[in-house]
Image (spheres, helix red, strand yellow):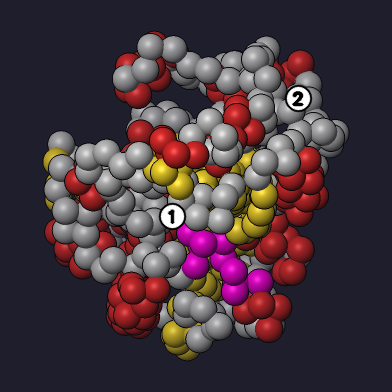
Amino acid sequence: MTTINQYINTHKERFLDELFDLLRFPSVSTDKKFKDDILKTANFLKDKLVAAGADKVEVCPTNGNPIVYGEKIVGENLPTVLVYGHYDVQPADPEHLWLTPPFEPTVRDGNIYARGACDDKGQVYMHIKAFEYMMASEQVPCNVKFMLEGEEEIGSVHLADFVRTNKEKLTADVILISDTSMIANEIPSMATGLRGLSYMEVEVTGANRDLHSGVYGGAVENPINVLCEMIASLKDKNGKITIPHFYDKVEELSTLERQLMSEIPFSLDDYKKELDIAEVSGEQGYSTVERASTRPTLDVNGIWGGYTGEGAKTVLPSKAYAKISMRLVPHQDSEEISQLFAKHFESIAPKTVKVKVSFHHGGEPVVVSIDSVAYKAAERAYETTFGRKPIPKREGGSIPIVAMFKKELGLDSLLMGFGLDSDAIHSPNEHYGIFNYLKGIETIPYFYQYYAQMSK
């Protein structure tokens, strides 16, 4: 019988070529000009699921981007795993900072450089190739379902409706997701918590038109100046967010939890060197690991207004804008936090300007049990392929649909991520290690094997 390692060695080049083909589609969900590429990506994945051996494969329309579904039911009494992933990607901007074209995969130093290489196309495609192996070797110990969406990067705006409409089709025992990271290639880990998200946009308006800064400067308010002052006031000198009641539901970690987090391998010097920064910052009284995973945050993701073209233009702008995101921790509610933000931001605006606050999207924080059968099975799978058990750790990112799956389907999610924090997701020169890609393909079939055994 062919082992997974033998299968990978035989088909390695094809596995890489197919992933490269997938990465060439600029499936950017936030920009409507890429709509055709979104559809091409969905159909590509449909074809690959069919080729791997899945049944009832379809591209399901939604009011937004389609969802690719497929399944393989091998036994009514066997556990069912629902694989979730997303095929949409972040914009490649600013493209001039990429060393190679973002949608032409390039291998350097064992890494695949392309937008979506790690988030999430590379990690999604591991599951299709792992499934292909299980079908080819006639070793499918669980029922398998796939649900691959095209709107994760814009808040999965139509996924909940699809899930509610297709609850019977999506019946399963656990949801398997690979959209997170490990500590290091030599130190596997599994995400046991994710922060939630509240994403806002603000608009500050002064005069009814752009003004000559010489004629009106000093007499009429500059919205950019006001916006900067308002944003600066959202945190105090200790890095604490100043929005009233923001921390009311934030749960402090226990002494034991903080001790366990302190044991996670982490070098502050290496961290600063990798980012080329002289010093870290954040909420006083917490470590860098804690700040980046278990504490809420508020950050400006974009700010603009006035003249930004070449040369000079002495203009007093009429408007200024900013996009602001808040990462949330367990017990914080994204809708409640969004309302608190809007109320506070409007209250601190001077009478010299008008303020508009808009909500883009959000999601709830989650914590994953390390005592479930699925987690224990995954733990054994990592131990089989890496030679050591994965370290449980909370992650600072957000996957809003995890909480939605629990609410709508009553299912817990298992977060088997194979990326690294250094993979530059959402940034120029995003990449994914060939080692990580192939290691994921190797590890996933063992999860199915152990999960079937331990579910009896």
- Magenta stretch: give its range: 151-160
Q: Quadrant of residue 418?
A: top left
Q: Earlier in the sequence, mark 2 or mark 1?
A: 2
Q: Secondary structure at mark 1?
A: helix
**Image x and y of residue 281, in percent:** 53, 17
Q: Secondary structure at mark 2?
A: loop
Mark 2–mark 1 distance (CA, rounded to whole Å) = 32 Å
> Which amino acid type corresponds to the residue marked 1 in the rendered image?
Ile
In the image, 48 versus 314, the foreground residue is 314
Mark 2 or 1, which is nearer the eye? 2
What label does residue 253 carry, if any? 2
Magenta stretch: residue 157 in it?
A: yes
**Image x and y of residue 138, in percent:** 38, 72
What label does residue 444 carry, if any? 1
12 over 224 or under it: above or below: below
What label does residue 249 carry, if any? none
Q: Residue at x 44, y 64 (%)?
A: 30
Q: Quadrant of residue 349?
A: top right
Magenta stretch: residue 63 in it?
A: no
